[in-house]
Image: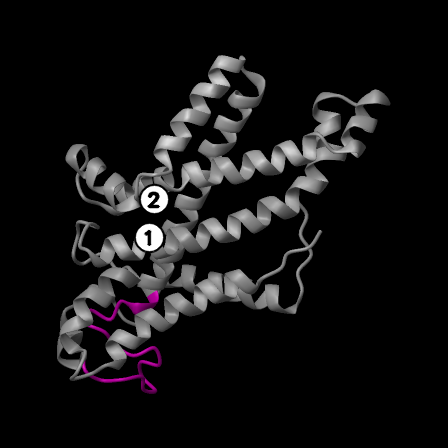
Amino acid sequence: MLRLRFKYWDWWVLVLLVFCFVGILWTPHNPMAQDFRDAALEGPRAANWLGIDGLGRLWRGAGNTVLLAASSMGLSLLLSSLLVSVEQAGPSWCGRFIRMGVGIWVALPVVFIGLLLLVFLRPSPGALVLAVGLGNMAFAFRQLRVYWIGVRNALYVRSSEVLGSHGWQLFRWAIWPNLKPDLLALSRLLFAMSALELSGLAFLGLIGDPDFAELGSILKQNQAYLYQAPFLVVLPGAVLSMVLLSVHLSRFHR
């Protein structure tokens, strides 16, 4: 069972992520309304303390970025875990085939995978999640495989096997407590990579719906105001940087 103990900074990260998620469900103003176009050049004020971008979508965009990045991270971890399980438990030829395929896959940039998927799928946030999740799968597989082999071959695990611990009992009491810190660190790294890559693909216009609120797409649309109202470009970048820095500095303990 995954039990985490939160320290002060970890509580700040949790509050920040929850705040971003709230923006998906509720914002002080309708982010899809067109009434805010005339107020697009106004900065933060008492009535709109987050400021107003082209469609008033900054808060919702932060929530969507966090949600899409977390989905991509989960997809990468899930696929890489399945590959590691098959590679370790399957026959030797299967393991060699998987390692060779991952070696080729890791050389493919996420942008290329995204463009390749868009040949078969309509541009959408889901297609970007799939592209980023698949793109980071090879990196996650390599890291997770190193962690698994290091823990699985450790002397304390071997000793537990000699004492009669096998299967789920061995995993729960000997492997998982020592694998968990590395897995949490990998999750933070994958989240940061996914958020940056998703925002980058959205900035290139591959998200499909131009009205979908995401920090990368908001940054792209606000480029036109760079000299007239530079804060419209600074705010999305600052929010993305704050989320990534907070997650990077977080330390979750048992």
In the image, the segment drawn in magenta is 41-59
Q: Is residue 39 left or right of residue 151?
A: left
Residue 159 shown in magenta? no
Binning the other alpha carbons within 10 Å of mark 1 as few (below 14), some (14 to 19) or many (20 upward) gives many
Q: Secondary structure at mark 1?
A: helix
Q: Is residue 160 above or below residue 3?
A: above
Q: Quadrant of residue 199?
A: bottom left
Residue 129: image quadrant is top left
Residue at point 17% right, 39% down? Answer: 122
Are discs 2 and 1 less than 8 Å apart at CB?
yes
Residue 136, position as x, y percentages in the image: 40, 42
Q: Residue furthest right?
A: 163
Residue type pointed to by label 1:
Glu
Q: Residue at left 41%, top 31%?
A: 102
Image position, residue 250 (x, y; %): 58, 62
* Main secondary structure found in the magenta portion: loop
Say if residue 25 shows up in the picture: no
Rendered image: mark on residue 62: none
Q: CA distance from mark 2 to mark 1?
A: 7 Å
Looking at the rendered structure, which numbered label has been put on residue 132? Answer: 2
